[in-house]
Amino acid sequence: MTEPPSQVHPQGTDRRWQALCVLCLGVLMIVLDTTIVNVALPSIREDLGFSETALVWVINAYMLTFGGFLLLGGRLGDLYGHRRVFLAGLALFTAASLACGMAGSQLLLVAARAIQGLGGAMVSAISLSLIMNLFTEPHERAKAMGVYGFVCAGGGSIGVLLGGLLTSAFHWHWIFLVNLPIGALVFGLCLVLLPGGRGQAGARLDVWGAVTVTASLMLAVYAVVDGNQAGWGSVQTLGLLVAAVLLLVAFIAIERRVAVPLMPLGLFRLRSVAVANVAGVLWAAAMFAWFFISALYMQLVLRYTPMQVGLAFLPANLIMAAFSVGLSARMVMRWGVRGPLASGLLLAAAGLALFARAPVDGTFLADVLPGMLLAGLGAGIAFNPMLLAAMSEVAPQESGIASGVVNTSFMLGGALGLAVLASLAAARAEQLAPAGTAAALSGGYQLAFAVGAVFAAVAGLLGAALLPAKAPGAN
């Protein structure tokens, strides 16, 4: 059995909000690590002698284990206690950060990045369920999810700024070593502020379910992140995707028969859970495209420095802060999840559509800022209701796996969307001018932004058509 509600919450409202801040600090450390490395890649390549093809594994090793272990991490939290698994993941991530920061060879850095991804998956999968269990009253939950949403949505831009600062002022090793004091602080505060809990007494892990779904996710992520290099129609990519599908079919068959499944398939009979996860895949595909491809556009076409790119995202981050921390919660309490989610995603689609102009001689005020404002506004409005929709109908004893499912949707949607849209951009740029001129790059980015806008618009229309007007308990 899981801990009763009286044991789930620390004594006193202030302690719950303090616990939220600590959880979000841990999540921020994970989110930062997905973007802070991008700025330092040229320095890492020069220092450790990476080739162009080998360098991508500094990113891909992290994505592979992060995406592959999200579901398992969430279920482990349900079975063995959310705090225990959260702290284990945090310790693993921090130790791997130390190994990354001390790495003097390519093999050590890539291996440490893979371990970082495993720890990050455990932290990300558990943090959302801890927040849902800490805040059960609808108004407080909406506010707490807003804070969490802001950290997730805005952390990437902070990573670009911090990565540029640390790499320029010190050395690329510091983009990893900076995690050490943060990880130690979060670990100590979690011991004080987070409730203990024992998980589900006597429950056993669905081993074969864990093996098949983790292998399926890892093969799918590998096929996606290596698709541009291997070719989307290559035997390797298609073979990996087929193997991932077969393992997923085997996982579903196992879950139908096992007494205590890793992932109760009944979750997807809950309309809000199913719709929010499908919309989350499309939304993540669109927003990853917005963040990464707009950064490439500003760097490679407009010739912005990494620091200027981070500053260019600042207006969007400020808007996301305003909506995520307070305004989005008020909208959810007044109008439910459907209206804010759909309107936010459609605004984000409009922002991406503006970026689809992407002129070679663009200026910040005319060609960057308007799209940033709309995309930031849309993300700030939509993220909170999307998370609430994905989690609100779920029983407390299944909150960990539901958190893992929605995080997996975001991760795989983002990875798949980014890989596909980057491939489209590269193919279009090559058609326009094989030499890779600024005009050709701009043409490729225009296509990627346009397809990303379609993804966001479809997600918004799905939410408008299929989600209930209000999340359960939000009346």
Image: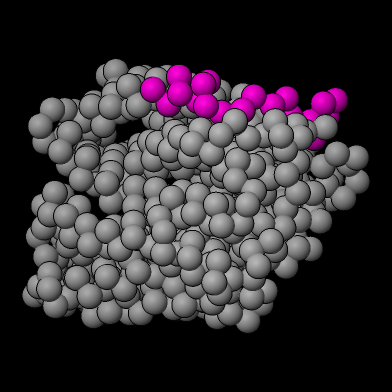
Residue 448, position as x, y percentages in the image = 35, 71
The stretch in magenta equals: 185-206
Q: Residue at x 39, y 70 (%)?
A: 378
As drawn, is 62 to the left or to the right of 437? right
Residue nearest the viewer, comparing 293 with 230: 293
| Residue 337, visible in the rendered structure | yes
Residue nearest the viewer, comparing 441 with 376: 376
Q: Residue at x 28, y 79 (%)?
A: 354
Q: Residue at x 75, y 63 (%)?
A: 270
Query: Total number of numbered labels?
Result: 0
As drawn, is 366 to the left or to the right of 177? left
| Residue 223, visible in the rendered structure | no
Q: Where the C terminus falls, by quadrant?
A: bottom right
Where 380 sits versus 361, above or below? above
**Type of colouring:** one colour
The answer to if 195 sits in the magenta stretch is yes
Residue 241, position as x, y percentages in the image = 60, 55
Where 373 sits versus 192, above or below? below
As drawn, is 26 to the left or to the right of 258? left
Q: Quadrant of residue 8?
A: top right
Residue ranking furthest to the front: 12
Residue 4, position as x, y percentages in the image = 76, 35
Where 62 sits versus 103, above or below? below
Q: Where the N terminus falls, by quadrant?
A: top right
Q: Residue at x 43, y 26 (%)?
A: 186
Residue nearest the viewer, comparing 334 with 188: 334
Residue nearest the viewer, comparing 193 with 162: 193
Residue 462, position as x, y percentages in the image = 59, 77
The answer to if 335 sits in the magenta stretch is no
As drawn, is 112 to the left or to the right of 140? left
